[in-house]
Image (cartoon, helix red, strand yellow):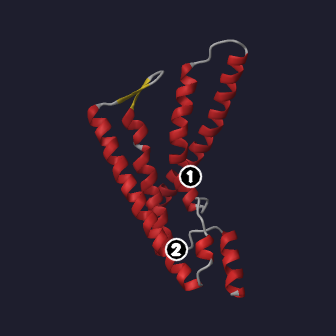
């Protein structure tokens, strides 16, 4: 069990590091592209393809880590109005809803990946890329996000960061 946990965390952190590295590489590629165009020369069409792929892959690679670190987007205004017990119950329902949505998207992404693999679909841009390679990140990412939200549910943890929890405690004292 410990091996699986370490492997999972290594994949989770590796995906986040790869997302960060891709963002830096995209920024450098765009700067190079703009510099070449400004100099009056033709840049590589591969730069455009790389940035398009990056715009798909970076969120998929980074999202599971963001959920684990409670860096995901949330709106807590409604929850702050609830009493502590109702707030905890609402967060449990929200966590389960997040798990369900992520499982459905992982399943759908898996079906698309298999479909693209079986049909040998290609994404034709400046070079031909097997589409299943791009789509394979979808079930991986949403599957890992489902596990992270499930972890919050099972542990009864808040989905929110420390700042929101502090505000909730202060509201609970006053109300």
Residue receiving disc 2: 91
- Residue 154 lies, with reference to residue 72, above or below; the image says below
The residue positioned 43% from the left and 38% from the top of the image is: 134
- Secondary structure state at the residue bearing disc 1: helix
Badge 2 crowding class, 10 Å Cα cut-off, few under 14, some 14 to 19, many 20 or more, is: many
- Which residue is at 48% across, 75% downward? 92
Residue at point 58% right, 75% down?
Answer: 79
Mark toward the start of the polypeptide (1 vs 2): 1
Q: Residue at x 55, y 37 (%)?
A: 54
Which quadrant: the N terminus?
A: bottom left
Left/right placement of residue 39 relative to residue 77 reads: right
Tag 1 and tag 2, C-beta contact below 8 Å: no
Say which residue label 1 marks.
Answer: 13
* Image location of residue 138, percent across then percent down: 43, 47
Locate the C terminus by quadrant: bottom right
**Residue 163: quarter of image:** bottom right
Give percent across and percent down for residue 111. 31, 46
Give the secondary structure at mark 2.
Answer: helix
- The answer to whether residue 92 is left or right of residue 165 is left
In this picture, residue 62 sits left or right of residue 128: right
Instruction: Give above or below for 79 relative to 131.
Output: below
Q: Which of label 1 and label 2 is nearer to you?
A: 2
- Quote the CA–CA distance across marks 1 and 2: 25 Å
- 93 or 133, nearer to the observer: 93
Q: Nearer the viewer, residue 5 or 136?
A: 136
Can residue 3 be seen from the camera position used here? Answer: no
Q: Is residue 153 visible?
A: yes
Depicted 160 relative to depicted 57: above or below = below
């Amino acid at each position: 069990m410990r091996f699986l946990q370490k492997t999972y965390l290594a994949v989770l952190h590796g995906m986040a590091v790869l997302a960060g590295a891709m963002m830096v590489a995209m920024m450098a590629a765009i700067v190079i592209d703009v510099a070449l165009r400004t100099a009056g020369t033709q840049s590589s069409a591969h730069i455009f393809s790389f940035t398009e792929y990056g715009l798909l892959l970076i969120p998929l690679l980074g999202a599971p880590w963001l959920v684990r670190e409670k860096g995901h987007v949330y709106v807590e205004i409604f929850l702050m109005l609830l009493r502590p017990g109702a707030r905890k119950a609402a967060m449990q329902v929200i966590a389960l809803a997040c798990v369900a949505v992520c499982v459905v998207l992982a399943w759908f992404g898996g079906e698309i990946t298999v479909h693209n693999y079986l049909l040998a679909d290609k994404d034709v841009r400046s070079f031909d890329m097997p589409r299943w390679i791009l789509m394979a990140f979808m079930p991986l990412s949403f599957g890992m996000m489902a596990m992270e939200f499930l972890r919050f549910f099972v542990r009864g943890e808040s989905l929110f960061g420390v700042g929101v929890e502090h505000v909730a405690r202060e509201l609970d004292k006053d109300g």
